[in-house]
Amino acid sequence: MKNIKQRSSYRMIITIGALLMLISCTTQPPTDLTGENIIPKPVSVTATGDYFCLGPKAVIYVQDQSGENSAIGNYLSSVLKPATGFNLEVKQTGEIPGKGNILLTLSGAGQVGDEGYILTVTKKLITIAANKPAGLFNGIQTLRQLFPAEIESKTVQDIDWHIAGGTITDYPAYSYRGAMLDVTRHFFTADEVKRYIDLISAYKINKLHLHLSDDQGWRIEIKSWPNLTLYGSKTEVGGGVGGYYTQEQYSDIVKYGDEHFVTIIPEIDMPGHTNAALASYPELNINGKAPELYTGTEVGFSTLATKKEITYKFIEDVFGELAKLTTGPYMHIGGDESHVTKKEDYIPFVERVQDIVIGLGKTPIGWDEIALGKLRPGVIPQYWSSAVNANKAVEQGAKLLMSPSSRAYIDMKYDSLTRIGYTWAGLIEVDKAYNWDPATLEKGIGKENIIGIEAALWAETITTMKDIEYLAFPRLPGLAEVGWTEASARNWDEYKIRLGNHAKRFIIMDIGYYPSKLVPWVE
Ligand code: TNX
């Protein structure tokens, strides 16, 4: 008798133990949503004091009549899978989800615009509501940051997937939040570019501007001008082997960008910064002679022959091929530092190139010097150094893209000891990259004159993905917040605490960040 009793109570203990193991979520959950370290900082966060626990049986419900956003459901499932080990099912249905699930819906978001979202966490359900799939994507980036940092792990982690309850309502201050990567001075592979897309999109950056041509190398296959890559791609700064993207690889980058709501913007810099093209085709030179390939770091010594018709045929062909491969609305025409192009040649050249790009159905972007000439309607000048040019652009009614070199040039060193980087625009510590307001930076340029901001990473001194990460992190998340969060809601002393709490995520994501002494890192 006693034996039977003992056995059944053993069984009971074993059953309870097994049940506890099955029902995960047994550790102390977080309950204050307002205390989470979200970057960029959302517009509003309210907490309810309870929490949600994600389990293996959760279903991702996607509600959308058009069927447009089923891909985003799969994306969320794939984001959560590696660390949780859960194979979360995605259901495209109008059904009301039961307890323990996630709902992505394109209704009920209200006044949050095209990129905003409302994220609601109750004990029963996580809901992300948005007007557009881009808003759902942004809501998912916030959701990632609400889970424990281990959610970013590539291997299954045995922890509870709790998040605090409440509501986040969020939308961006600026519609254009960009990063520029120079793949000319040193070449970076398509996989490295994709990793950069992963990293920037996690902070809601929605544009990647690729600087595809410069003196030191031509990086994109153009079928009608094959020597550009057969010859002009084979160098880089310091004499390395260079490289280029085939059109197929470029299209794959564009597609990967689209899947992450990052618009790819191809730049062909001209009329200066063109030595690689000039070396590949003698007819593009004023004197008809091809120069040697170039592997130094000087700027401002090359120019296309602006008075030759063949030059415009070249530009039409190059942008024509690129326009077909580029799904986004923009193409960047460069226009910077054309020191050996006469001003009377530069202005009509840049005006004609704008017309070519507009004729191809795209919107030109160009460095601020293009405001020296007439800007076609809708063209976006990118402010990098000249307040005079920027004001000329505003006088012409243009909206500016703000990349002030003293704040947003993340190829600058952090301090004098930084092992890579330049110093010509000053040292840019993490606080300096964060602590500025695009709308008050230059006299005469207000928020109404600005489309957004872009963090530029020039590549003279960097050669590896780890170098990219070191210069971009942690300045890039700060610049992402400059673009997303209204200046009145930002404050360095508060931000640095949130940033410090991202260290664990950086480590798990294998981001080789610069551990600035100004930030209280919590590893
Ligand atoms: C200036 S910024 C440049 C680039 C260099 C960069 C280095 C701009 C429009 N032109 O050609 O790579 O400085 O920091």
Image (spheres, rainbow, N blue to C red):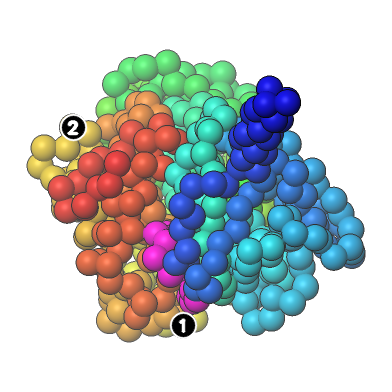
Q: Nearer the viewer, residue 330 or 103?
A: 103
Give the secondary structure at mark 2.
loop
**Label 2 neighbour load within 10 Å: few <14, some 14-19, many 20+:** few
Location of residue 25 with respect to 329 vertically, above or below: above
Label 1 sits on a secondary structure element that is helix
Instruction: Identify the image quadrant of residue 64.
Output: bottom right
Quadrant position of the N terminus in the picture? top right
Asked if residue 37 lies in the magenta stretch, the reply is yes
The single residue placed furthest to the left in the displayed view is: 416
| Residue occupying image coordinates x 85% and y 65% | 96
- Asked if 12 appears above or below 280 in the picture, the reply is below
**Amino acid at dot 1:** Glu
Horizontal arrangement in the rendering, residue 256 relative to residue 399 (left or right): right
The magenta segment: 34-46
Disc 2 Cβ-to-ligand 1 distance below 8 Å = no
The one nearer the camera, 449 or 156, is: 156
Where does the C terminus fall, quadrant-wise? top left
The one of 189 and 476 positioned closer to us in this rendering: 476
> What secondary structure do most residues of the magenta stretch adopt?
loop
The reply to whether the C-beta atoms of the residues labelled 2 and 1 are less than 8 Å apart is no
